[in-house]
Image (cartoon, rainbow, N blue to C red):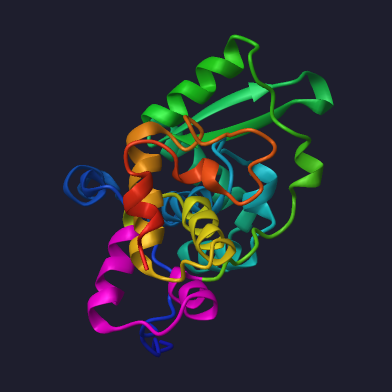
Amino acid sequence: MRSFPGFREGLSRHTPLPESFFGELLPLIDDLAELQVILFCCRSLAQKDAPVRYLQKAELEADEHLLLALRQAAPGQVPADTLQRALERATRRRVLLAATFGEGEDGQTLFVLNSAGGRDLLARLEAGQWRPGDARRMAANLPERPGLFRLYEANIGTITPMLAEQLKEAEASFPYFWLEESLQLAVQHNKRNWRYVRAILDRWEREGRDRGLVGREGQKDGRRFVSGRYAEFIANCE
């Protein structure tokens, strides 16, 4: 048995999981490969830097870490077959939802989490309001994204123990691309502090990331992002 060297302090990215995963779902799962695939999908979907989040089977088949885990879960079996069975179990249990689009050899299956966002995405696909991209352009390992701790230290400054707790809470609460963009805004506006970043995130959570945030083209200084009721507070976050 190979030993685990331990979780890295401070620089590790955290993947949020709903509380119901531990209290309701975990006791139901009796297959190691199924658990591995579900956890991989949660991690991979969290890394998607777009509001439309889905996975195609080609993405899962291309990830070496997942395939290695599946080899350990089912020794002597072809990892692709183990993956297929795990996906079938996860969809029968309705942890993942699947939808097929296209016909014949061009037909593809996509997977989403059984969440409000995932259900809405499949409803829009069925209604013809949205269509996924070409799977062939996505069949590569999902890129490893830098953790929020590393991003903050590289762009803002030193992380204190108290701030570290706030960053962990933010990672579990907001999509990763929100965190990246809010840090970029802090750098652009020369407001290199967590209060400024958190104020932007809180506003996006209340009003939607796009509502009220798109200003006139002439507003090159980024003031469109801090308009409205909390504009003065955000602008004074030094």
Look at 47% across and 38% down and name the residue there: 209
Image check: 153 left or right of 95? right
Q: Is residue 21 visible?
A: yes
| Chief secondary structure of the magenta portion | helix
Image check: 125 left or right of 4? right
> The N terminus lies in which quarter of the figure?
bottom left
Is 154 included in the stretch rendered in magenta?
Answer: yes
Which of 17/70 is in front?
17
Look at 36% across and 86% down and name the residue there: 6
Circle count: 0
The residue at the far top in this view is: 127
Is 142 included in the stretch rendered in magenta?
Answer: no
Residue 104: x, y in percent?
Answer: 81, 21
Residue 199: x, y in percent?
Answer: 35, 53
Residue 188: x, y in percent?
Answer: 59, 62
The span picked out in magenta is 147-171
Vertical side of 24 occupied by 109: above or below: above
Residue 65: x, y in percent?
Answer: 58, 68
The residue at the far left in this view is: 23
Which of 62/133 is in front?
133
Which of 36/232 is in front?
232
Image check: 160 left or right of 13? left
Look at 33% across and 56% down and name the residue there: 172
Vertical side of 74 occupied by 88: above or below: above
Q: Can residue 171 be seen in this view?
A: no
